[in-house]
Image: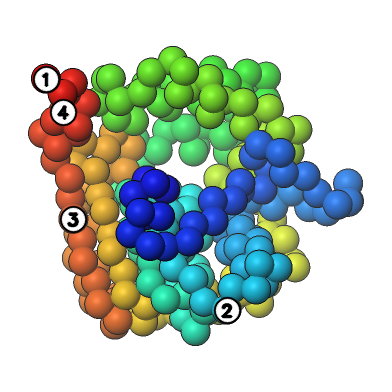
Amino acid sequence: MVPAVQGAGFQTVVPWLRGFGPTSFLSSETMRSGEMVAMAQDTLDLANALKLNTFAVVGHDWGARIAYVLAAVHPERTTRICAMSVGWQPGELPTPALEQVRKYWYQWFMATDRGSEAVRRDRKAFARIQWETWAPRGWFDEGEFEITAKSFENPDWPDITLHSYRVRWGEADKDPRYRDIDRRAKAAQTISVPTLMIQGGADGVTLADTTDGKEKHFAGGYQRHVLDLAIFQRAKRPTP
């Protein structure tokens, strides 16, 4: 995506999320929080360091949740967002419908002690089964997976990943350092930043209907596009 965005005249910054790739903490005592509000604050800190007063945010999955937090809490900094796969609604996350609960099996798995041990024991195998079941076959090749899997070798990855899913569903304590941004994010009732939401119609984990009817939560303009499987198949077809 980056070459296309840069070709349109935009400057891009593509940071690693905490706990992935070469990231590290300054102190061993710092809580390894995987909260979306923590990563939203990381984004703000990065923007401040780069002297970016305003910026747009493009994010998939965790990135989409981070984008929503930034748009809800700091609309004066966030010019617009593009969120992929995950919808937004005010307040705490509700328990999903049962079919979505079934798709989220890995999140409940990580909320158990045995599941956490399994993830710590073989993080690469745990990621691989997600890649193989979240989308139609053929969407990635071995080289792509191996390059991405290197980012899971970060020693903080297990703690941050496990905490992220546990705290999401109330199964872990929050980091008190982010209490204010968390409170403001949960209190937001609408997002005033122009928003583009892209949903995969063949998404094997976040069902497309979970992002239906979200327009009422966006006061600054909202477009939602559901991409069907035919688009994916055309994109993967070799050029004659």
Q: Earlier in the sequence, mark 1 or mark 2?
A: 2
Instruction: Give the structural element (helix, strand or loop) at label 2.
Output: loop
Q: Name the residue that disc number 3 marks.
A: 225
Real-space CA distance between mark 1 and mark 3, rounded to the nearest whole angstrom? 29 Å
Could you tell me which residue is drawn at 21 percent across and 26 percent down?
236
Real-space CA distance between mark 3 and mark 2, rounded to the nearest whole angstrom? 29 Å
Instruction: Give the structural element (helix, strand or loop) at label 4.
Output: helix
Q: Name the residue that disc number 2 marks.
A: 53
Mark 1 vs mark 2: in front: 1
Q: Name the residue that disc number 4 marks.
A: 233
Could you tell me which residue is drawn at 25 percent across and 67 percent down?
214
Q: Where in the figure is residue 59, as x and y percent of width and height?
A: 43, 54
Q: Where in the figure is residue 51, as x and y percent of width and height?
A: 65, 73
Tag 2 near tag 4, CB within 8 Å: no
Say left or right for 184 vs 106: right
Q: Earlier in the sequence, mark 1 or mark 3?
A: 3
Estimate how packed mark 2 is, as few (under 14), some (14 to 19) or many (20 or more) residues with alpha carbons within 10 Å.
few
Instruction: Give the structural element (helix, strand or loop) at label 3.
Output: strand
Q: Name the residue that disc number 1 marks.
A: 240
Q: Amino acid at mark 4?
A: Gln
